[in-house]
Image: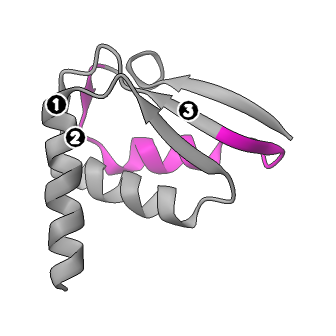
């Protein structure tokens, strides 16, 4: 098993808005990977649909997913999504 780091700005861009892009990213991670560090450095925007899909994919992933260099507004978006999911 191995660990990798994904630099989201490099893989997707500084604006994280497309649900399909994070879906594809998670699908393309090798099955032998045990831990993925998602590096949010340089990310300027994250849309709600991207955040929702990211959290869904993280929850069902066969590997551990951790975040680093997360901007405050990205963290707040994740918190909003998690609060909404807990109310459903």
In the drawing, what numbered circle is on residue 75? 2
Horizontal side of 28 relative to 34 (left or right) equals: left
Give SS at disc 2.
helix
Identify the image quadrant of the C terminus: bottom left
Residue at the image position 79 percent from the left and 49 percent from the top? 31
Give coordinates of residue 58: x percent, y percent. Answer: 49, 56
Label 1 vs 3, first from the N-terminus: 3
Give SS at disc 1.
helix
Q: How many marks?
A: 3
Give coordinates of residue 11: x percent, y percent. Answer: 48, 23
Circles 3, 2 touching at the beta carbon (< 8 Å): no
Give coordinates of residue 43: x percent, y percent. Answer: 27, 21
Compared with residue 39, is residue 47 higher up or lower down, i.e. above or below?
A: below
Quadrant housing residue 14:
top left
- In reply to whether residue 6 is colored magenta, the answer given is no
In the drawing, what numbered circle is on residue 37? 3
In the drawing, what numbered circle is on residue 72? 1
In the drawing, what numbered circle is on residue 5? none
Residue 66: in sight, yes or no?
yes
Depth order, front residue of 81/9? 81
Quadrant housing residue 53:
bottom left
Label 3 vs 2, first from the N-terminus: 3
Horizontal side of 32 relative to 14 (left or right) equals: right
Give SS at disc 3.
strand
In the image, the segment drawn in magenta is 14-35
């Amino acid at each position: 098993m191995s660990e990798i780091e994904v630099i989201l700005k490099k893989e997707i861009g500084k604006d994280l808005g497309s649900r399909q892009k994070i879906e594809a990213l998670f699908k393309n991670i090798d099955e032998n990977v045990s831990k993925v560090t998602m590096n949010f450095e340089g990310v300027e925007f994250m849309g709600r649909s991207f955040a929702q899909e990211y959290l869904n994919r993280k929850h069902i992933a066969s590997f551990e997913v951790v975040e680093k260099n997360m901007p405050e507004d990205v963290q707040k978006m994740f918190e909003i999504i998690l609060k909404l999911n807990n109310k459903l």
